[in-house]
């Protein structure tokens, strides 16, 4: 989306740890973590496989160690790595058998310092399993191991905290465990205790000197973590211990910002009460109010506004909270923001919230904005408009481009001008083949004779998109389109020069409206400078088969005309079109000529209002070409 933040705030601000998928390790995706051996290879007793040429080991997200084998043909299969023999001391610790642990310490003292493949000692196992008595026995034998780290740099204290083993944590701290040693992600035991939402452990760690403002690898402090989990009691403990209420992480995000972003109302109230800056901004300029509006937290927005949060402070992308609320369709929040958002601030952004609501099909938000008096004819600034190839400018253009007739109707009924954009929304509606939107635009004053600036035509350009849709062309003609222009030809009855054509692709490209139903005669790759005539457009192989019905329909909207030699050639090319040629050659019936004269006098806008006049139904049908020539 063009007007969203340069980076997704929720992803950058909320996600601070990246845990691997259970089926991924080292960046290698695996189908499963079981042995996967096809018929071409069998696992041997040694763990090798027939035909395997290479292997490597890894640990899955479940902590299972496996071996990946690669065959000569490139196929990959996985086998479990043979399990490591369990140390008797570890077995005794898991069982909580203190007597056996004491015996093994005496009989095998070296086992206390022998780590397994993950770098775990028996002391780590005891802390992980919450075996307090075993911890005391092990520390009595080897007190110097108290802060020993695993390969993931986890201390026994960290593992005890992670397991919510309060008594173990207390005993380790009493015996001198360092509360500030962090793991590989720079998470301290205090940080882990906040993640586990364990207030008792948090209090213990702080009483034994734990650093309250240490940061993890993403810059989060313990207060960030507690706030993210809406743990007000823990937040209170942390602040009493000296936590900085305005601490920022790597992206400039404060705890208050996280509370607003995640909808943590209690934590937000607590932080505001304790002096947090309500208008602080993250690295990308987003404020707490901006994030609450983006995520649709109505109660958070109400609280922030009641505490005078600044609704006129834009993010670096140039959008206000009102813009992002409209973009996301949070219409209740839009209603809350409108009274406190300066219209001057909105205009200085170069884009109206109406544009964003229309672009993202947020009809309810669009309705609220219209009812509150936002300018339906607001145009994008040059910088914003230039981001689109078609140089769109108005909210109406966005609605029509999305095929959103309801939104277009709301805007038009509120006074939107359908003729402000460089490329008329009428052209879009015709290109989309939407009869309803085309009629709606014509009814509200869209110019039926609009031209395409980059591809001049001698006839109304919207008709190009209606060549194979007579019903669409009829709507255009009923709306006052200049039918006479289709029969103007500079060559007349004289022979026409051979066509030099270049195909025009469908869609928008290079800031010019292009279409597939016409072929423009050009002498080079440049856009044509001589207006394209109708007889040339109808000669395209893509639409020439429609020449007869199109000319027949157009003749109903003109008086006496003379067909040029090229149009006559088309009518002569198909036997069934002979009557159409006769229709153009014979004098037109008087009633038909009168009808055309009346329509000319009434004019395009008047024709669109005929149905509102108190005229007899038969007369309305007559004026709207509902009678055939035989019935005139």
Image (tube, rainbow, N blue to C red):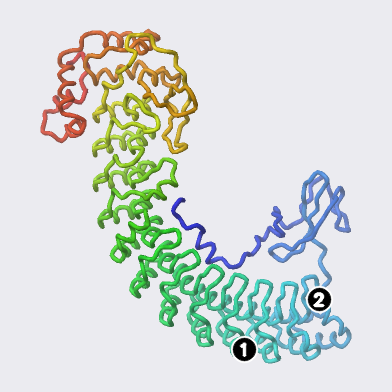
Q: Is residue 67 visible?
A: yes
Residue 564 picture location, percent across and down? 33, 12
Q: Which residue is drawn at 43% across and 62% down?
A: 315
Q: Residue at x 44, y 13 (%)?
A: 498
Q: Is residue 576 visible?
A: no
Q: Name the residue under label 1.
A: 209
Q: Point out which mark residue 115 bears.
A: 2
Local secondary structure at mark 2:
loop
- Mark 2 burial class by Cα count in 10 Å: few <14, some 14-19, many 20+: some
- The answer to whether 34 is drawn above or below residue 182 in the figure is above
Residue 479 picture location, percent across and down? 24, 30
- Mark 1 burial class by Cα count in 10 Å: few <14, some 14-19, many 20+: few
Q: Nearer the viewer, mark 1 or mark 2?
A: 1
Q: Which residue is drawn at 79% across and 60% down?
A: 57
Q: Distance between the residues labelled 1 and 2?
A: 29 Å
Residue 52 picture location, percent across and down? 85, 50
Q: Which residue is drawn at 55% across and 72% down?
A: 249
């Amino acid at each position: 989306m063009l007007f969203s933040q340069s980076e997704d705030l929720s992803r950058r601000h909320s996600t601070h740890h990246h845990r691997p998928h259970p089926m991924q390790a080292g960046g290698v995706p695996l189908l499963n973590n079981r042995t996967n051996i096809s018929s071409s290879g069998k696992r041997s007793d040694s763990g090798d496989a027939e035909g395997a040429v290479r292997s490597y080991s890894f640990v899955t997200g479940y902590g299972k160690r496996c071996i990946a084998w690669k065959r000569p043909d490139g196929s990959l299969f996985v086998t479990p790595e043979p399990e490591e023999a369990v140390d008797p001391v570890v077995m005794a610790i898991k069982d909580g058998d203190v007597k056996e642990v004491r015996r093994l310490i005496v009989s095998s003292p070296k086992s206390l310092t022998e780590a397994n493949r993950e770098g775990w000692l028996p002391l780590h196992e005891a802390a992980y399993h919450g075996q307090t008595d075993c911890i005391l026995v092990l520390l009595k034998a080897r007190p110097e191991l108290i802060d020993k780290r695993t390969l993931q740099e986890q201390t026994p204290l960290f593992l005890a905290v992670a397991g919510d083993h309060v008594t173990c944590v207390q005993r380790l701290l009493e015996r001198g465990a360092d509360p500030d040693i962090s793991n590989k992600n720079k998470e301290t035991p205090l940080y882990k205790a906040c993640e586990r939402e364990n207030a008792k452990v948090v209090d213990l760690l702080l009483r034994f000197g734990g650093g309250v403002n240490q940061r993890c690898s993403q810059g989060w402090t313990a207060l960030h973590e507690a706030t993210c989990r809406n743990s007000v009691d823990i937040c209170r403990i942390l602040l009493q211990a000296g936590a900085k209420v305005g601490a920022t992480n790597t992206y400039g995000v404060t705890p208050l910002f996280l509370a607003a972003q995640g909808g943590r109302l209690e934590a937000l109230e607590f932080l505001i009460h304790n002096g947090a800056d309500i208008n602080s901004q993250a690295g990308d300029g987003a404020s707490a109010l901006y994030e609450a509006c983006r995520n649709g937290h109505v109660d958070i927005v109400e609280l922030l506004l009641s505490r005078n949060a600044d609704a006129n402070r834009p993010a670096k992308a140039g959008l206000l909270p009102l813009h992002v609320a409209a973009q996301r369709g949070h219409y209740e929040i839009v209603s809350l923001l409108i009274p406190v958002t300066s219209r001057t601030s909105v205009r200085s952004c170069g884009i109206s919230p109406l544009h964003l609501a229309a672009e993202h099909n947020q009809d309810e938000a669009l309705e609220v904005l219209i009812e509150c008096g936002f300018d339906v004819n607001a145009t994008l600034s040059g910088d914003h408009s230039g981001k689109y190839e078609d140089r769109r400018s108005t909210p109406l253009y966005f609605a029509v481009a999305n095929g959103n007739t309801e939104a277009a109707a709301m805007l038009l009924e509120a006074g939107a001008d359908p003729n402000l954009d460089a490329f008329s929304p009428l052209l879009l509606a015709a290109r989309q083949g939407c009869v309803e939107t085309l009629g709606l635009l014509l009814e509200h004053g869209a110019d039926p004779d609009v031209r395409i600036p980059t591809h001049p035509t001698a006839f109304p350009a919207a008709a190009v998109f209606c060549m194979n849709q007579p019903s669409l062309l009829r709507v255009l003609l009923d709306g006052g389109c200049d039918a006479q222009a289709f029969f103007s030809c500079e060559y007349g009855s004289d022979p026409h020069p051979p066509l030099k054509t270049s195909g025009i692709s469908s869609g928008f490209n290079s800031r010019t409206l292009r279409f597939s139903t016409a072929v423009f005669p050009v002498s080079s790759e440049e856009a044509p400078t001589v207006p394209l005539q109708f007889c040339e457009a109808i000669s395209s192989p893509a639409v020439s088969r429609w020449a007869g019905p199109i000319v027949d329909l157009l003749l109903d909207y003109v008086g006496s005309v003379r067909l040029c030699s090229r149009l006559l050639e088309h009518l002569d090319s198909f036997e069934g079109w002979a009557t159409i040629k006769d229709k153009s050659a014979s004098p037109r019936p008087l009633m038909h000529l009168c009808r055309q004269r009346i329509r000319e006098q009434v004019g395009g806008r008047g024709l669109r209002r005929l149905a509102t006049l108190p005229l007899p139904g038969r007369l309305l049908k007559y004026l709207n070409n509902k009678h055939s020539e035989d019935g005139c």
